[in-house]
Amino acid sequence: MFGEFQIHEPATVTEAVDMLAHYGDGATVYAGGTELLLIMKEGLVNYPHLVNIKTIPNLNNIALENENKRLRIGALVTHRQLEQGTLIRERFPLLSEAAAQVGNLRVRITGTIGGNVCFAEPHSDPATLLLACGASMELSGKNGIRTVPAEDFFVDLLHTAKEEDEILLAINVPTQWVGAAGAYMRFCIHERPTATVAVILQLKDGLIETARIALGGVGPTPLRISMAEEILRGERPSRELSAAAASCAHEATDAVDDIYGSVEYKGHLAQVLTDRALARAIERTGGDASVH
Amino acid sequence: MTATRILGRNAPRVDGYVKVTGKAEFAGDLVVPGMLHGKVLRSHLPHARIVRVTANAAENLPGVVAVLTGNDLLDLKNWRYGHAIKDRPIIAVDRVRFVGEPVAAVAAETAHIAYEALGLIEVEYEDLPVVGNLDASLTVGALQLHDMGSLRAGLFHGLGEFKVGPGNVCYHHAFDRGDIGAVFSDADIVVEGDYTFPAVYQYAMEPHTVIAEHGGDHIIVRASCQHPFLVRAELADLFEVPTANVRVIVPYLGGGFGSKSYTKMEPLAVALARKAGRPVRMANRVDEAMVTTRRHNMKCWMRTAASDKGVLLAREVRIWLDTGAYADNGPRVVATAADAAPGPYRWQAVKVDAWGLYTNTAPAGSYRAFGATHLAWIGESQVDEIARRAQLDRVQIRVDNLLRPGEEVRPGGKPLDADLVSDIRIIAGHLDWDSPKSPDTGRGLGVSLLAAGAHPVSSAIVRLEADGSATLLMSSTEMGQGVRTVFSQLVAQELAMEVEKVTVPGADTQKTPYDRSTGASRSTTLGGTAVQRAAQDVRRQLQVATSEIWGVAPETIELREGAVRHADKVLRYSDLFLRYFGLAGGEFIGQGRVQPVDEGRGSYAAGPVFWEVCIGGAEVSMDRDTGRIRVNKLVSVADVGQAINPHLVEAQEMGGAMQGLGNALFEEMLYENGQLLNSTLLDYHVPSINDLPDRFVSSISENEDGPGPYGIKGVGEGALAGVPPAIVNAVADLGIAMYELPLTSERIWRAMQRDSA
Amino acid sequence: MLVSTKADLIALRATINGELVKADVEPRETLLDFLRDRLGLKGAKRSCDVQVCGACTVLLDGEPVSACCTLAYEVCNRRVTTIEGLSHNGKLHPIQRAFLDSVAVQCGFCTSGMVLTVKSLLEEHPQPTTAQIKTYLHGNLCRCTGYWNIITAVKQAAQLMDGGRDTLP
């Protein structure tokens, strides 16, 4: 059950930031509430002040900027909007695919991408893909606006680089990556995914020019598998190559034994999912999947 | 007698309209004037002595009317309850024995105030060693969780001599026949293994809810309970109020599946209401419901002997069931598991030992198809293995060894009353058993028997009204299975009237007559017999009344289409009333009852009322990289004697099969040293629509071989118990032998690693 | 002093099943409690509390939400539809009719949420495939029916509604 709290309705980002700064750890950002309200109900946290950022205009836009080089996703964009939005579905289908996996229909309708990444639950979907796509988080706080790349944003289990007085404004994703060929896969046992993998690939003249691979659920934060990426870079896709890259994934996990699985199994899943995601990504580049 | 007009008809649910419009009332929808909100403070320790409970701050919180602790029970002659063993305190008095055990309860004007008050109660504990699992409980010299000498049999023990111990044993059930040692030593084939079965949560979507009032000399309880009369007896006994002054009212149940059987939250709610002096409503959250009752987890050792021609010879089984901190229905689960262990086969020798053990985990009780679900997958996997070694088809080995109708299942008990060979052939047919299959798919099937019917005491009253409508008073509780609909059909059948003219109010011990329980698939058979007799009683009265009017013998009067008839004379019921009573009023009231008639008077040993057939088949494929099982096809047969409402039978099969699938593939309560790690649906996977197999095929076998009206047997549990063996055997068909449920992808993967090593 | 703070009670205005409702609500009051305890609309049920089971589903501006995890505050100036708002003058909505005809109701506890979610589904996909039905209803658990008859009911409802939008609000 909830303890008592007040709901504040900032009209601007500045007001919201001021409220957060004023109330300190007694306040938190409230958007869709799909994670926040659960932990409040269970008595795991206590916030007498909720700063409802849904009253601030223009935080739920999706726009192409900077000569279409950047996709800017407002923090209040819901998973459902990403799943169904025409621009996303047509130009950035990977993002739509990943968003479609989140929770269930009701969670997608109410939950926001900003809330999801700020909660930083390792067993979630969008973060893995955003990391693979080189996303960066645009934050606004008392000290102004700053941008934090995803790999620095996810600090630890349920912990991000966002300060107490900051709100996430938007997630900026280079279209070069989020629009590239790729694959998103997950393995799910409970309500949240056990393991997730996102692969982005660019081929040139039949060789892998860029590979970006991220894993989720097998460590306290999503992880880029740079060793796997290095193995792939400059090489021609092949079954052996993918297998080698996938076994890096196994080595790179930083998992613990828990109800989602043992360390060994999670490592194994990471390998299997990476292998399969690579195959599908290669296929989508128009590359010859039969070699795989 | 073949199916007649009303039987075999798919009459629409009589409660369908109210349920589909949101009007159906469940316990949590009820409001009683002056009602307070109750919340429970539960132990966070698995085993501890309670040193002190300090509740002053909570009591003084504005809006709090009462705080209940163990001290408030000390004026009762006995503050422990339990239908089998009186081992469970209404609220913890000196000791807590599981995480989640109620330690204090608050009644307040609002739920928020009650919740806040919980936070103000201080409990000082002294840790005790934790007996967290079966191994710990079985260890010689293990700490005893109960003072065994002080335990007494519950009001409804029903299992012969009451005996607890040694150690943490709450019940032991054993039987044997033949010379087990000799048969095994001579056998060509012996299959042996150790097996593990998980704790599973029933997840009825409506958690336990009670509104209790204690008025000094009377008690009224509105509760989500399956067995109102057993609850009534327990409350009368605990609070020393005459039985007739205890009223238990049961609205619609949002699922039961055994989780609301016997007595759960009612005594606590009544005790709190007693202290508060006002009605109190208590509703469990799901995480509270999970630790109120669960399915027993189990370890089992089994070996089966056979000849090299696949003749089954002997089976020896040892079973250890974890009943948690309190027995609940543990003893009966132990007995039923023991009965299910041999399987429906002809044996030269059988030896079964089954124990129920106390541990510091949530109490385990009834869950649909207990016993059979626990054991069938084990015995049936050994039969399959024997078939493989004897190079026999797995259907053929069953056809060769299955008991036939009339053969003894267990000594002194009811002989087999089902055609299992026919059923297994139907399952094989649904699976296209003989058709070629790809190497990536596995096929499996399994069959077992469940001792069904519980104790056969039920009664019913039918009141025929002057306008030709009827009220049926009976106390089977409606939890979705459609009992009110099926019984309406029975009444309509006997009284030649339309189903829509029969009204069935809910169970209310003050108004509806005694029914022992709703569970163990007993309602249609036992409650149905009582209903049929009550309706037949009215029928006879109508015949007698008409015979007085027409001057003909009563037995020559026919009832058809809402009228009494003789030759060319016809009287609609309403006209009969006018003639007979002299006004558009009066009633014909009929009663019917069923009670044990044989020697043993309904004892467990003389039963069961009928053997429920638990049978299923599956075709699976597997992702060999991840170990994930995909169920392509599930098949089932409902062997019900006769189906009064085939759609409702099929509905029970489909629902039961999905519960069985969950139990087989992913449902598991994860305990670590007495702490439950997954107490919400975020971490406990209940089957969703996405978990459906690609295809489900079920059929109904109607051989009219049951004890109920028109040869009816019960239904509801067989499909669930039929699924785990089918899936385990299908996975074995893929070359992977499994000894532990659920078949999570990780376990399958590990088994593949084990096999390739 | 900060602007736009909400004091202890919030003056709520919302349209519930087509009717304007005004009430004072606490910030922490859930939509589920508001509907059930304040308005007596008890069709939405409390079950899992964590947005997994769907028993508390209501429609907010036509879209399914978990009332147990939605603050009553959120429905200010918005439209809420509960199961009670589906049938009119005793006449069942085609989805309700289909659930009865297809034997898709047993204990009934999941039914309110399930039916409302189906309403939303059929508005988006008037002739849904089995795959679409499964994706949409993934978040609505049923422990009794085993789901097959629910799938049948959805398809039957789609036929009854014949691809056209129903005329109810």
Image (spheres, coloured by chain):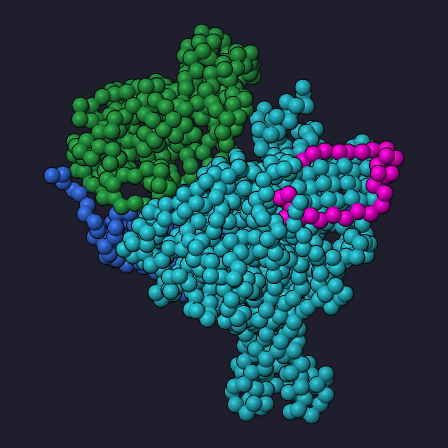
Q: Say if the magenta span includes residue B400.
A: no
Q: Residue at x 35, y 50 (%)?
A: B55
Whether residue A289 sits left or right of residue B559 in the image: it is left
In the rendered image, what is the letter of the chain coloured blue?
Answer: C
Comparing C54 with C129, the one in front is: C54
Picture quarter with the C terminus of chain A: top right
What is chain B's hue in the picture? Answer: cyan
Horizontal relation, residue B282 to residue B253: left or right: left
A186 vs A49, left or right, is right
Q: Does the magenta stretch include residue B168?
A: yes
Q: Where is residue A266 in the image (x, y as percent from the top left)?
A: 51, 24
**Left or right: B466 as drawn, with respect to B320:** left
Is residue C142 visible in this depiction of the protein?
no
Q: Residue drawn at (23%, 52%), measured in percent from left and top?
A: C12
Give the colour in which the image draws chain A: green
| Image quadrant in which you'd find residue A36 | top left
Q: Which residue is drawn at 18% across and 23% down?
A: A144
Whether residue B603 is visible, yes or no, is: yes
Residue C8 place in picture, x, y as percent: 21, 49
Which residue is located at x 67 percent, y 55 percent? Answer: B162
Q: Which of B147 and B481 is in front in this view?
A: B147
Vertical placement of B68 versus A13: above or below? below
Figure quadrant of residue B462: bottom right
**Residue A183 x, y percent position in the rendering:** 45, 23
* Closer to the camera in the image, B619 or C7: C7
Magenta-highlighted residues: B167-196
Q: Nearer the viewer, residue B363 or B239?
A: B239
Q: In the displayed orientation, state which residue is furthest to the left.
A: C1
Please state the horizontal and vertical placement of residue A99, each as a whole percent of the image: 39, 32
